[in-house]
Amino acid sequence: MIDVDGLTVRYGGGGPGAEGDPDSGVVAVDDVSLSLPDGEFVAIAGANGSGKTTLVRTFNGLVDPDEGAVAVNGTPVADDALAARTAVGMVFQDPRDQIVSATVGGDVAFGPENLGLDRAEIDRRVDAALDAVNMRGRGDDRIASLSGGERERVAIAGALAMEPDHLVLDEPFTGLDEPARRSVVARLRDLRADGVGVVVVTHDLRDVLALADRVVGLADGRVAVDAPPERAVADLPGLDVRVPAAFEAGQDPSPGRTEPP
């Protein structure tokens, strides 16, 4: 469970404990409260600059709030960032920002190695994570040889190897061609079926709206929509968020993209 209570984040101001006016600066997240239960597939949607990325980066302590708090499984992130980062796996918008090894297997093993696990457990986690993203047997592949979609899957595997309760993906489809997008959607569908909590941050819901249990729409750092997809979809275009044509027409599309990019 991720609990967000009265969260406010500012950029460019004094900030807590800093010199200057702590209330100055640009408000990126403005008094947001929400709960994300285990096993739920949540789409956090909004236009660029709406506060989506800043919000999810508070879930595991990558961004500290100016006001309010985030707790993961009942423990405040401020009290135990390591526990939060273990429970909340993060996949950045550009996988190059988190890939740290020259090979697929080495990169996926990096997180478990830093937990101090024994070799047998690390190998088990790496194998399971690569299976989950359909990359079994590719641990020796060089990262430099991979396509964009394959790098995205390696980044997802690296997060899964930490065995998180929630997997957060920030704009996971940016720059991917159609086959790669379908492959990532398929992996997310499998994770949802396995009971992993999935949070997808996006301005374009055409790939994932049919998978989502819930949509949280942000505008100017505030929650403007929080509802199941069939109820949320009417308000999302007003937030500059793209939705599948079939949802706009009141139909029930199968998971994945329903119209060309």
Image: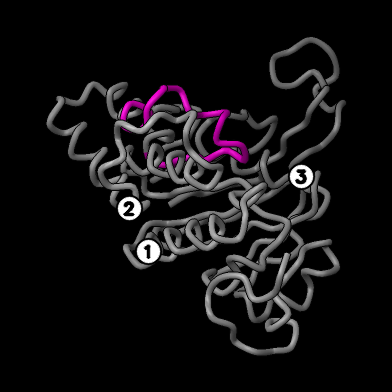
Mark 1: secondary structure: helix
Q: Quadrant of residue 102?
A: top left
The residue identified by callout 1 is 190
Q: Residue 143 at what x, y percent from top left?
A: 45, 30
The crowd level at tag 1 (other Cα within 10 Å; few <14, some 14-19, many 20+) is: some
Between circles 3 and 2, the one closer to the viewer is 2
Residue range in magenta is: 87-108
**Colour setup of the view:** one colour
For this orientation, the residue located farthest to the front is 145
Residue 105 lies within the magenta run: yes
* Residue appearing at x 15%, y 25% in the figure: 118
249 relative to 66, above or below: below
**How far apart are the alpha carbons under marks 1 and 3?**
34 Å
Label 2 is placed on what type of residue?
A: Ala
CB atoms of marks 2 and 1 within 8 Å: yes
Depth-wise, is mark 1 or mark 3 nearer the camera? 1
Q: Which of the two discs, 2 and 1, labels the residue nearer the N terminus?
A: 2
User: Where does residue 113 sit, x and y in percent of width and height?
Assistant: 28, 23
Q: Position of residue 228 (x, y in %)?
A: 60, 75
Q: Which residue is mark 2?
A: 132
Q: Is residue 78 magenta?
A: no
